[in-house]
Image (cartoon, rainbow, N blue to C red):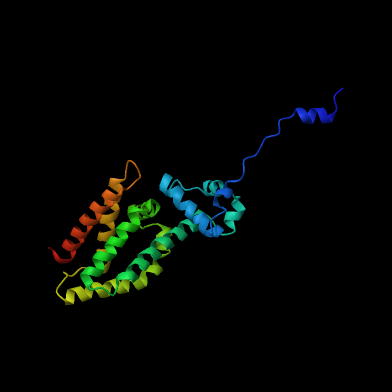
Amino acid sequence: SRGLGDVYKRQKVPIMPPPKRNKYLSSSLSTRDLIVDVAEQLIAQHGVEGLKLKDITKEIGIQLPSLYAHFAGRGAVLLEIGKRIFEGIVADFDQIENLPPREALREHTRLMVKRYTTNRAHVLVLLADFAAPQGIDALNDSEAILYPYYEKLTAVLERGREEGLFNKVETQEFIANRLGIILVNIAFASLKTGVFTEEQATRLEVNVLAQIDFMLSGD
């Protein structure tokens, strides 16, 4: 008769692949930042509605409890992405707020075009917000980040009017119109491939700047 040892030898022991986390070992990112980065990658591929926590953990090579140690759930991950979007807007504006009014708004627009033509995930999150009548929680709950930006932008628009450069345009109207112009152009141009080329980005910048100039001054 065969012993247990012989039976064990005949069994096929599966060889487990190394955890995916290995490909991120060289990253200096914290696990929290890595979760958000991977979430953005997945949104870029599958859209906002296609984002699933199990896909994030699978891609990184961690278990769900590890993710929950950093985020309460999917909504919390999206909220962090919303914060990144708004912090990017503020950081870009801080670079140009001391320029003359027209140059400031044109340069900020260029920075926005550059940011969104290279970050599909942020574009899809913003488009989801545009499509929802009341917006989405990921952005609604982060809006306080933008309050200082609203004040600075209002001051630039008022200074431009005082100098005879701009027509009267309300701050929220300017923000919504400019962002809408950028997002719609990107969405249509990259609808099929999901890729926005450098040539398309250059054309978009020219078109957006022309529309911004017209909105501000009618020229």
Q: Position of residue 103 (x, y in %)?
A: 23, 69
Quadrant of res 113: bottom left
Please name whichever residue, 97 or 170, is drawn nearer the observer in this view of the structure. Answer: 97
- For the C terminus, which image quadrant? bottom left
* Relative to 78, residue 160 above or below: below
Q: Quadrant of residue 6?
A: top right
> Residue reaching furthest top?
1
Q: Is residue 4 left or right of residue 46?
A: right
Q: Quadrant of the N terminus?
A: top right
Q: Is residue 30 left or right of residue 85?
A: right
Specify whether residue 71 is in view: no
Q: Residue 68's spot in the image, x, y percent?
A: 58, 56
**Which image quadrant for residue 92?**
bottom left
Q: Give whichever of 151, 42 is nearer the camera.
A: 42
Q: Is residue 194 above or below residue 206?
A: above
Q: Residue furthest right?
A: 1
Give residue 157's position: percent from left, percent from top: 23, 72
Q: Residue at x 41, y 48 (%)?
A: 44
- Residue 84 is situated, as x and y percent measured from the top left of the image, at 42, 61
Can residue 10 be seen here? The reply is yes
> Closest to the observer: 22 or 113?
22
- Relative to 168, does residue 78 appear above or below in the rendering? above
Q: How many numbered badges does the structure rendering display?
A: 0
Residue at (61% x, 53% y) in the render = 65
- Residue at the image point whose x is 33% and y is 70% from the top: 95
Q: Nearer the viewer, residue 50 or 6?
A: 6
